[in-house]
Each structure stands twice: as C-alpha cells, then as structure tokens.
Amino acid sequence: MEKLSPEALAQVAAYFQALSEPARLRLLNLLRERRHSVGELAEATGYSAANVSRHLALLAQHGVLARETQGTSVYYSIADPAIYQLCDLVCDNLARRFERTAAQRAAFAPAVPRKRTKARA
C-alpha cells in the first residue's frame, strides 16, 4: 500500500467503506454458503427488498459479489471468496484486542473484599 497513488488509495478506502456497514456484513454472512435472491435475503434479515438491493449493488460494484438474473429474480453470490479471509483477519484482530483489554482491566480491578464477621459479645 505504501507505493500506491492517491487515486489508488481512494479506491482502497472505498472498498473498505463498502464493508463498513453492519447490514452489508450480515448479508455477506448469509451468502457464505450459497447464492440468494434479494427477496430471500430481505426475508432473512427483515430489511426491505429495496434496502437489501441497494447494499448488494454496492458490494457488487466493488467486485465482492456477482449478480445473476433469472426470470424476475436477481441472485447474488460471492465473487471474491477472499473477502471472508479479510473479514476473519479483522475479527481475529479485534478479538485479540478485546482479550488484552479485558486482561489489562482485570489486572487493575480491586480485590474482592472479604466478608466481615461480627465479633461476639
């Protein structure tokens, strides 16, 4: 990435921006196993078909998804399976960061106070 032109860096940023929407990541997870129609994805997510279609079109524009029309239905599938490697890399990195943060937080947590016993009279 260090020798890319500003124009190329803008394209890289746009690619990552396409992945920055949780709804798109949810759609990618649903497409992991097989292709789906817009209607199937809308039903599975609870999003409107128009919203799903808009998200899918953006992912297709960036080369992540392939689009196929069959009759009146449009089906989407993964065009670049490496997208899952990229997502797994990011997820693993976040998990390690959260584990470190939790361990650091635990190191500074106060010791659990001991119960006081009442002295007998």
Image: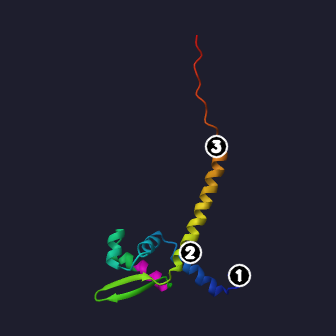
Sequence-earlier tag: 1 or 3: 1
Q: Which residues are magenta?
A: 54-61
Q: Is residue 57 above or below residue 28?
A: below
For the residues labelled 1 and 3, the Cα–Cα distance comes to 41 Å
Residue farthest toward the left in the current orientation of the protein: 72
Q: Are marks 2 and 3 in contact (CB under 8 Å)?
A: no
Q: Quadrant of residue 118?
A: top right
Q: Give how far apart the Cα atoms at labels 1 and 2 are.
A: 19 Å
Magenta: main secondary structure equals helix
Say the numbered circle drawn on residue 2: 1
The tag on residue 86 is 2
Task: Tell me the amino acid under the disc marked 2.
Answer: Leu
Spot occupied by residue 102 in the image (x, y as percentages of width and height): 61, 52
Foreground: 62 or 84?
84
Q: Is residue 84 visible?
A: yes
Please give the name of the residue rendered at 51% of the width and 77% of the height, measured from the top-left corner.
Answer: 18
Does residue 40 appear left or right of residue 21 in this picture?
A: left
